[in-house]
């Protein structure tokens, strides 16, 4: 299985952090696939991006919370 990430380390992304629109840099990516422990059939996938803001690691974010431009971020609010 090959996973293609939307962003790669070094890419700039816009996101909401501490109630502010900020530009950060993707530092690493993570992907996980899980089988439900409830029904043992449902498969969930999780794609996360670790982002640094002003040189400090902020947190990991889901793909749906990251945007390529400030305009896209503001439209989503």
Image (cartoon, helix red, strand yellow):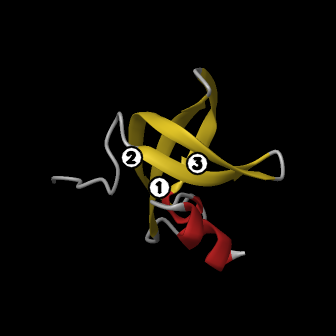
Measure how far apart labels 1 and 2 are at the Cα level.
6 Å
SS state under label 3: strand
When the figure is inspected, residue 76 is found, relative to residue 51, above or below; the finding is below
- Foreground mark, 3 or 1? 3
Viewer-nearest residue: 6 or 21: 21
Q: Are marks 1 and 2 in contact (CB under 8 Å)?
A: yes
**In percent of the image, x 44 and y 44: which residue is there?**
12
The residue sitting at the front extreme is 71
**In percent of the image, x 62 and y 26: which residue is there?**
54
Closer to the chain start, of discs 1 and 2, is 2
Image position, residue 58 (x, y; %) = 66, 32
When the figure is inspected, residue 64 is found, relative to residue 61, above or below; the finding is below
Q: Quadrant of residue 34?
A: bottom left
Viewer-nearest residue: 39 or 75: 75
- Location of the N terminus by quadrant is bottom left
**In percent of the image, x 47 and y 55: which residue is there?**
46
Closer to the chain start, of discs 3 and 1, is 1
Q: Which numbered disc covers residue 31?
A: 2
Q: Are marks 3 and 1 in contact (CB under 8 Å)?
A: no
Image position, residue 77 (x, y; %) = 72, 75
When the figure is inspected, residue 64 is found, relative to residue 2, above or below; the finding is below
The residue sitting at the top extreme is 55
Q: Are marks 3 and 2 in contact (CB under 8 Å)?
A: no
Measure how far apart labels 3 and 2 are at the Cα level.
12 Å
Residue named by callout 3: 61
Viewer-nearest residue: 42 or 64: 64
Q: Which numbered disc covers residue 46?
A: 1
- In the shown orientation, is residue 72 left or right of residue 35? right
Closer to the chain start, of discs 3 and 2, is 2
């Amino acid at each position: 299985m090959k996973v293609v990430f939307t962003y790669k380390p070094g890419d700039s992304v816009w996101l909401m952090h501490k109630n502010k629109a900020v530009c950060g840099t993707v530092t690493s990516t993570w992907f996980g696939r899980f089988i439900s422990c409830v029904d043992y059939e449902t498969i969930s996938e999780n794609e996360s991006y670790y982002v640094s803001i002003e040189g400090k690691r902020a947190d990991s974010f889901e793909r749906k919370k990251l945007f390529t431009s400030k305009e896209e971020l503001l439209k989503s609010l």
